[in-house]
Image (tube, rainbow, N blue to C red):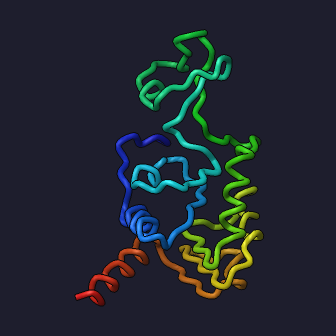
Amino acid sequence: YMVHPDAEPNAVHRWLYDLEKADKLRGIVTQNIDGLHRKAGNKRVYELHGNIHENYCINCDAEYPLEKITGSTGVPRCDRCGGLIKPWVVLYGESPDRYTCIGAEREITGADTLIVAGTSLQVEPAASFIEYFSGRNLVVINREATPADAKASLVIHADIEDVITAVISEQNNASE
C-alpha cells in the first residue's frame, strides 16, 4: 500500500521536532506525503507534494480525513454533492501549491545551514529548490550521490535514520 495510516514518526522526525523546540530549526521542506513531520509536532512544515491526511471533494471542496478514503469501497465520493474525493497530494504532471512553494523558498533563502536528507534530488520542481540556498553550510545526507554533493560543506552517504541515530547517541554521550 502507498498509504500507511498507522505509521509513526521515527528518530529523525523526533530529532527535527527537538531542534524546532530548541529554536534551532526554522522549517522543514519535504517531498514526503505521509504527514509524519506534523505528527511529530513540527509546526513550520512545507509539504511540497501535499499530505495524504488531507482530502477534498473536487466539486465542492468539502474536506475529509484519511479515514474517508481508506474506509470506502471503490472511488470515494463526497457526502454533500457526490463528487470525487481526492487527496491533497501532487500527482505527476500537477504543480505544487503556490503558497507552499513560496514558504519553502523563503525558508531556504533565509537559511544559514541547509540539510538535504533522504533525497536523490531528481524530482522536479523540488530538486530545484536547493538553488535558493545561499547560506554557509550545505549538508547532504543520502545513500547515493546527489547533484548537490559537489557544492556541499559536508556529504554523508548513508541512511538518514542511521546518521541521526548516531548523532543523538553522540549528543547523549556528550551530555553525560
| Residue at horizontal 63 percent and vertical 83 percent from the top | 137
Q: Nearer the viewer, residue 121 or 78?
A: 78
In the image as oriented, which residue stretches furthest toward the top?
Answer: 81
**Relative to residue 120, is residue 38 drawn left or right?**
left
Image quarter hosting the C terminus: bottom left
Residue 101 point in image, percent of width and height: 71, 53
Residue 88: image quadrant is: top right
**Relative to residue 71, is residue 107 drawn left or right?**
right
In the image as oriented, which residue stretches furthest toward the left?
Answer: 176
**Relative to residue 59, is residue 172 drawn left or right?**
left
Residue 71: image quadrant is: top left
| Residue at horizontal 31 percent and vertical 81 percent from the top | 169
Residue 65 point in image, percent of width and height: 46, 29
Residue 18: image quadrant is: bottom left
18 vs 53: above or below: below
In the image as oriented, which residue stretches furthest toward the front?
Answer: 23
Residue 127 point in image, percent of width and height: 71, 63
Q: Nearer the viewer, residue 32 or 173?
A: 173
38 vs 137: above or below: above
| Residue at horizontal 46 percent and vertical 51 percent from the top | 38
Residue 1 point in image, percent of width and height: 46, 40
Q: How many marks?
A: 0
| Residue at horizontal 70 percent and vertical 77 percent from the top | 148
